[in-house]
Amino acid sequence: MTQSAVDPKIRRSGRWVFVTGVALLVIWVLLPIWLLFVNALSTPEEVAAFPKSLWPSFDLASLSFFFGFSGVADALLNSVLVACATMILSIGIGAPAGYAMSRFDFAGKELFRFLVVMTRAFPLPLLALPLAVMFIRTGLDDTILGLALVHTTLALPFAVLITFSLFSGIPLELEEAAWTLGCTRLQAFIKVILPLAAPGIAASAVFAFVISWNEVFAAAVLTIENRTLTAFLLQSLDVSPLPLKFAGGAALVMPALIFIFAVRKYLFAMWGIANR
Amino acid sequence: MSRMLPYMLLLPATAFLCLFFLYPFSLVAIDSVTRDGVYSLENFQRMAGHWKFGSAFWNTMLLAAAVVPVQLVLALTMASIVSKLQTGRSTILYIFAIPLGISDLAAGLIWLSIFEQSGFLNSFLVGLGILDKPMLLLGYQTHWIIFLAIVLAEVWRATAIMMVILVAGMGLIPKEYGEAAQVFGATRWQRFYKVTLPMLKPSLQTALILRVILAFEVFAVVVALGGTQVPVLMSETYQWQFALQDRGVAAALAMVILGVSVAFTLLILRLLHVPKEARP
Amino acid sequence: MKNQTKLLSGLAAAMIALMAGPALAEPLFWSTQAKPVEESQKMRADVLSKFSGGVDYQASDEGPWRTRIDAELKAGKGTITVLGGLHGELSGLENNLVDLSAIDHVSIGDGLMQLGKLGTSEQKYIPWMQATYLMAADKKALQYLPQGADLNSLTYDQLIAWAKATAEATGGPKFGFPAGPKGLKHRFFQGFLLPSYTHSMVSNFRSAEAETAWNKFKELWQYTNPASTNYSFMQEPLLTGEVLIAFDHVARLADAFNKRPDDFVAFPAPAGPKGRAFMSVIAGVAIPKTAPDMEQAKALVSYMLKPETQVATLRATNFFPVVKTDLPADLPPSVKVSGPAITAMTEAKDALPTLLPMGLGDKGGQFNQVYVDTFERIILAGQDVKQVLNDQAEVLRSLMKDTKAPCWAPDAASDGPCPVN
């Protein structure tokens, strides 16, 4: 970032605008979340009161109610397992397809792309009935894998399209250079392409996780004994008293935030490589 | 071997989608064009004849038209900021990505707590002395506030999705291009417009398609903030499927959502066409 | 990278272990009731824990609830042992429910049992619990009651005058009505407002009296908090003070009475020229044909009817017992407040009980929609009352023709489908 030609005064004011912009955006993103936690950590009386305070009284009654539920730990584990399985399946199945679409011209390519887009454009609640019938008949019903398969259907379009756009952005010459140096196609892919695409792949993995984590409808229909946390809590929230709604919302948001925080390293660690 | 390779790579995804999407989808699609087992367009007639269908359709379009462009600009801004940052990049990126982890149900709840009559916005306005008592913001007489609240909530919730795709895409643009442009005296804006944006086309295309499709399925946030005041296609689908228990009409509505999504996808593909020879 | 592989393989192993785990033998109680988290927790801990072998109580939204049972019926096998739902939710499933007439039900009234036949000759569900709708008010609003009005025998005109006086005195409309997406507004029109003016729910849908009723409601709406279109449960706006007078389902007012029992009063719904119409809410338990263990299912249904189960259910859900039983003294405030008001309503001299729709099969939702659409068009969209009633009457008529449902109270009995005049 050398901008020697620019007057330092302009540069300083430009910098000031930049910092303010970043700060405003950070507030825009964080403030609503903060408000959710304020409500979740307030007493029921405070949640009903007016005017609202921007600082919670750190009352844990509403939140701890959820953790007193029998089965919350199991449901949490189920949610994590389903989400991880969804992540693995959607990348494992989606990334090869994305790569193929970016590197080859072949008959049926547009048809495939159309199918992928269509998957996401059709309301899932209507598909839940035929899927549930199929799962009950085959014994996939009420299993972690069964739900993960449905969630993969939701996440796959993201995985395919994101990896497609990523691989399209990586110059073919890099791969060709590796081939001329004696690499096989697979070796070239693993040694040259994969490191470059890793952040994007991580991003679509994060999507897959989050999509699965937040999905309620299929989870409520397809799991009974193996309820996910979302199906366990979220679907009854709209009829629960307000304080519990907020506490339930916070209880569900927190694990997702922790997950994104935990994987942010993978999301961005490769930045340096890509941006040499 | 080489000719078969793409098909082999596509095979798992295709098989998967056929089994878990195409098969159940075709059953629902058949539902939409049959009534009591015979072929009929009655479902579509009923759907179109319902007095709320028109407003549901236009509300959905209007919301998408209001939300997506704002998100595009915001996501591009956020992505550029992240790529410019020297220090604290991963913290800022993490913060920008946070709404990714928040479901639409939870987002609806959050924004409801801001806009409800005894909510945070009213507390703020009364505290500043702008209002002397809390004002009803989400009433049926003030449709525009409901609409604004939905737009804000959607922009807040779903911009991160585009942002992360664009960040990943920007990471792939070789720095040399920008530096070369700089050598030739291009301003920062020119560099963004002439170098970054064209190079970003594949990611931009993906981000837009995914976002637009999801915008047509907007539901939980709308219901949380607008109740039945702002009918959208998805809420009408729910209504017909579950409250009115007419699966045929619900299937017809779903086909409309699908049709609109496909039409816009084709449009975006055409507008943001990435010619083969121009690919890096 | 190595750590990641380890993590993944560990996860995979855990997943396989989980998937192979045997299904539990606890019977599944699949319900749309007691859905709020606090209530379902009480159902599990206080109501069902004494059933031998335990019960897996799962409450869900109507959408997933219906999708799941439909899927099991279609697949021809299932895990749902007992279904719990409102009358309207169970109707439409009648061809797939087991006849329960063998269950001992002597202590349940005949009228209730009749509803459970869903218009067939078999006992399709057994009534499980009941509730009704009431008015509630913040005591602060009582000072604005019109002269000579008695809270226990209010008329619609008095209610309007009261709402008006309250609005003028407090600087804003303070009547509240659950017109939100999950609100039960249709029941107010079907079972309270219209019959009070027309002595009918269906036949006199577009009569001159019905027009009067809607115009009265239009008047009341002027003093109704416009946020009502967002309210699904009136307990919250009552607690926040956004609303001082409200109408809702007893279970949806309960939180207000329980949190601040000294601040709120409950009283009967108002009366119109044709009487004080009110509607009960009935929830039933039923057994789907696909239940995995019939014996266990029937045992669970019987268990739900035991007096002590019924009292525990009352505590958990604020729904009242369907069997005759003495209520203990230590009930929550909501029950203590609403109980006398319900009695005052059902035993009023001008009481006009109305029944839940019968014989509509899976068209119950469309029946409700007729009333909701009428409300939205007349009140919210401000369309011409007569025109809207004429339009909607046609929808209602074709619905009655399709389902061939005969009239139910308060409409006079009919041969064949209930006519819409």
Image: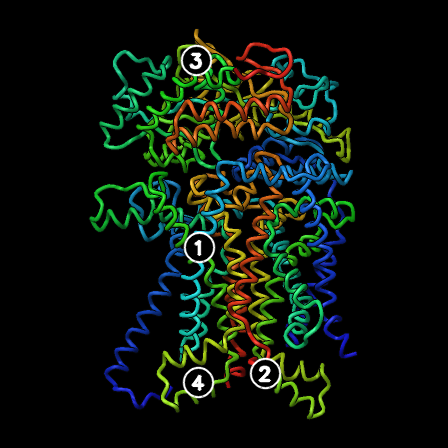
Give the quarter of the image for residue C29. top right
Q: At 56% from the left edge and 57% from the top edge, which residue is drawn?
A: B263
Report whether mark 4 lies on the same chain as mark 1: yes
Q: Nearer the viewer, mark 2 or mark 3?
A: 2
Can you tell which mark lies on residue B132?
A: none
Quarter of the image with the N terminus of chain A is bottom left
Q: Nearer the viewer, mark 1 or mark 2?
A: 2
Estimate how packed mark 4 is, as few (under 14), some (14 to 19) or many (20 or more) residues with alpha carbons within 10 Å.
some
Q: Nearer the viewer, mark 4 or mark 3?
A: 4
- Per the image, label 3 sits on a secondary structure element best described as strand
The kind of residue tagged 3 is Arg
Residue denoted by label 2 = A171
Q: Farthest residue toward the bottom?
A: A181
Residue denoted by label 4 = B178
Residue denoted by label 1 = B154
The kind of residue tagged 4 is Gly
Q: Chain of mark 2?
A: A
Seen in the picture, residue A264 relative to C42 is either above or below; the reply is below
Seen in the picture, residue B207 relative to C307 is either above or below; the reply is below
The kind of residue tagged 1 is Glu
Residue denoted by label 3 = C276
Report whether mark 2 lies on the same chain as mark 3: no
- Residue B225 image position (x, y, % from top left): 42, 45
